[in-house]
Image: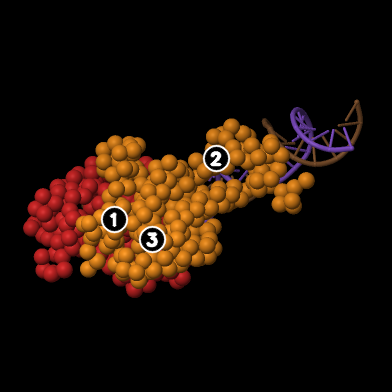
Chain colours: A orange, B red, C purple, D brown
Amino acid sequence: MDDGLLPIGERGGAIRQASVALILAAAETVFAECGFAGASMARIAALAGLPKANLHYYFGTKERLYRAVLEHILTLWLDAARHWLVPAQHPRQAFAGYIRDKMAYSRDRPQVSRIFAGELLRGAPHVRPFLAHQLRDQVSAISAVIDGWVARGLMRPVAPAHLLFAIWAMTQTYADFAVQIGAVLGHTPLEDADFATATETVIELVSRGCGIIDSKREDAPCLC
Amino acid sequence: MDDGLLPIGERGGAIRQASVALILAAAETVFAECGFAGASMARIAALAGLPKANLHYYFGTKERLYRAVLEHILTLWLDAARHWLVPAQHPRQAFAGYIRDKMAYSRDRPQVSRIFAGELLRGAPHVRPFLAHQLRDQVSAISAVIDGWVARGLMRPVAPAHLLFAIWAMTQTYADFAVQIGAVLGHTPLEDADFATATETVIELVSRGCGIIDSKREDAPCLC
DNA sequence: AGATTTCTTGACCATCAAGTCAAATTTGTT
DNA sequence: AACAAATTTGACTTGATGGTCAAGAAATCT
């Protein structure tokens, strides 16, 4: 027997797990392409290779299916923060590692970023609590770390939250608005070289922009 | 008589112009809130205070109405580029002016940015040609200006296109994802002070990040 | 004023998508 | 094997939505 929460969850027989995974994967693709309103259960079902009634059997409603997809995404979002938590880490490594990770995600899993972007664009009707609690707490924690670096003279004073907003924006734009970037660069899809240049550009922009002193180098940027 | 293109356009009697403007304004709001798929003609009509059939009289289809809204947006997008064209302008002024303008737009007309963001997120089905031609040409022109500054030693070498992507991303995130920023900062909507801090943060990030030398200051950042 | 064009509007239609259902089938249990 | 639970599936219902239409009201023209 199940633990009371019948559908969704990770528990259940092998058949359930397999079907749920199949449906979630298809849903992620379709929601990323069409958004919540634009997606249809029929299309998700077709992509999953299952009859539509099957989706309703496992997830009840379109809304519940969408929430299930979102749940997966939110955990991924928070996970990327580990870069800040390495104790006694130098800001250069922390920023570079975080940016590299986020950018790799934009390249490898753009769908995840796009679903989240669509959700925010529509006013975050489903993830408002997440933003106001988990994400907010995480930003507070990271801000404290950054302020510590500033206090120790490792970088110039900045508004930590806004710096994070900037990093999120610069990295996710390569997933969310890839068509635009591809069109401007003259080729679609984006190539590995594009992401390499982008990563380099963002890391340099942030490192120099924050006046991060690299103790291993001699040409340390000024703190002015 | 009209010039052959019956509906839409700016020409026509006073009644037509007034109705069209009313509908376009309502459509802009609803499309920004709900996206193309999520918006309904009935809702736009209600917001405009007109019967639904009226919208179809002037615009024919939902698609045509949407395209009309987009057309307006695209011109605004291109207009902001004037900052780069001032001849013999110092990069600091150009960047700061452009960022200030874009940020002000995110604050004052977030709907415009959101509709464009939604369009890109769905793969730009309606504006692909615009991206590949007008926008691409404009980026080329601006890139040339930036490369000129680099050549004259006014800033360090950067990938101009990616720098622009970064600036677009950082400024538009305050319109497109305002809920997220508001939730993290702990208040909604965003206040003028938030935008002031954001503008300052982005300008400093870009100026220092690009190693822009300000000839009027003594504490010029290093070019390293 | 009379004719003509433009505009307004409620009612109507066709389509499509979410969600339901019950019967059939498979799987798991004793 | 026999029974119960889980799963599959096509057919169906219901509601919303984009779009149409024709008749009337208003504005414009001669």
Distance between mark 1 and mark 3 Cα atoms = 25 Å
- Chain under label 1? A
Q: Dots 2 and 1: beta carbons under 8 Å?
A: no
Residue A160 rendering spot, x and y as whole percentages: 37, 66
- Chain under label 3? A
Q: Earlier in the sequence, mark 2 or mark 3?
A: 2
Residue B160 rendering spot, x and y as whole percentages: 21, 49
Q: Is residue D19 above or below residue B184?
A: above
Residue matched to label 3: A164
Residue matched to label 1: A216
Number of the front mark, 2 or 1? 1
Residue matched to label 2: A25
Horizontal arrangement in the rendering, residue B181 relative to residue A208 (left or right)? right
Distance between mark 2 and mark 1 Cα atoms = 45 Å
Location of residue B17 (image quadrant): bottom left
Q: Residue at x 54, y 57 (%)?
A: A126
Q: Residue at x 47, y 55 (%)?
A: A82
